[in-house]
Image (cartoon, rainbow, N blue to C red):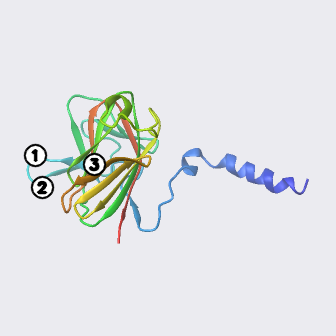
């Protein structure tokens, strides 16, 4: 019985920890989270006037309700037209950006890397990367973008999306609401030395 006691105590402790807390990502040294999982702090809409920015700091949804936060996930809601959500911060140094996304059937979104867009979609239905072998429809998938200078190398679950995507020397990170529901989580960036 004394050998079972540590196992029983461990099992009781694990049962007490809420699932959401247990799943919180641990950030690697030098990595910053671009999405806190609670609200849209650090994100907003670019205004029509140059330099204008509608900040959503402390808010759980955008002014048009196209973006919202629920249970640690940034939800891109279906709606009329296209809406683009941007970070306030710009990223002039080389970096590695990682995020997870889940696309509804035929959903269409996008990830902006300093401005240019990488298509993020239900790839096997909506394309353009219909030959991916590791893409998991309607499940969580990971995008990794490594930016060196003015070139981005982009993968989904380790499979190549774009090897030499041209990007400006600096700029923010953005997401697009176009068609269908998309979900994003664990959006994190690490500057490269």
Q: Which residue is mark 3?
A: 56
* C-alpha span from label 2 to label 1: 8 Å
> Who is closer to the viewer here, 124 or 18?
124
> Who is closer to the viewer here, 103 or 81?
103
Q: Residue at left 31%, top 33%? A: 127
Q: Is residue 122 visible?
A: no
> Who is closer to the viewer here, 154 or 5?
154
Q: Check if mark 2's residue and mark 3's residue have beta carbons within 8 Å.
A: no
Q: Which residue is mark 2?
A: 51
How many residues crowd around disc 2 within 10 Å: few (fewer than 14), some, or many (20 or more)?
few
SS label for mark 3: loop
Q: Residue furthest left?
A: 49
The percent coordinates of residue 15 (x first, y second) are 69, 46
Q: Check if mark 2's residue and mark 1's residue have beta carbons within 8 Å.
A: no
The answer to whether 47 appears left or right of 93 in the picture is left
The answer to whether 166 appears left or right of 69 in the picture is left
The answer to whether 192 appears left or right of 89 in the picture is right
Q: Check if mark 3's residue and mark 1's residue have beta carbons within 8 Å.
A: no
Ranked by sequence position, the earlier of labels 3 and 1 is: 1
Q: Residue at left 40%, top 50%? A: 99
* C-alpha span from label 3 to label 1: 16 Å
SS label for mark 1: loop
The percent coordinates of residue 13 (x first, y second) are 71, 52
SS label for mark 2: loop
Q: Which mark is residue 93?
A: none
Q: Is residue 11 visible?
A: yes
Q: Residue at left 22%, top 61%? A: 150
Ranked by sequence position, the earlier of labels 2 and 3 is: 2
Of badges 2 and 3, nearer the viewer stands 2
Q: Residue at left 74%, top 53%? A: 10
Q: Which residue is mark 1?
A: 48
Q: Residue furthest right?
A: 1
């Amino acid at each position: 019985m004394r050998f079972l006691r540590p196992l029983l105590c461990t099992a009781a402790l694990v049962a007490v920890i809420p699932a959401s807390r247990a799943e919180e990502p641990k950030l690697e040294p030098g990595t910053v989270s671009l999405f806190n999982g609670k609200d849209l702090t650090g994100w907003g809409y670019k205004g029509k006037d140059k330099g204008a920015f509608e900040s959503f700091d402390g808010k759980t949804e955008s002014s048009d309700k196209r973006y919202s936060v629920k249970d640690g996930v940034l939800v891109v809601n279906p709606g009329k037209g296209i809406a683009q959500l941007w970070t306030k911060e710009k990223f002039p140094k080389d970096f590695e950006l990682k995020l997870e996304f889940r696309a509804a059937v035929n959903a269409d979104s996008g990830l902006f890397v300093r401005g240019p867009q990488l298509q993020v979609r239900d790839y096997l239905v909506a394309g353009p990367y219909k030959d991916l072998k590791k893409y998991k429809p309607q499940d969580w998938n990971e995008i990794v973008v490594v930016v060196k200078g003015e070139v981005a190398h982009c993968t989904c679950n380790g499979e190549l999306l774009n090897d030499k995507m041209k990007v400006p020397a600096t700029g923010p990170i953005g997401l697009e609401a176009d068609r269908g529901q998309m979900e994003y989580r664990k959006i994190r960036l690490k500057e490269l030395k």
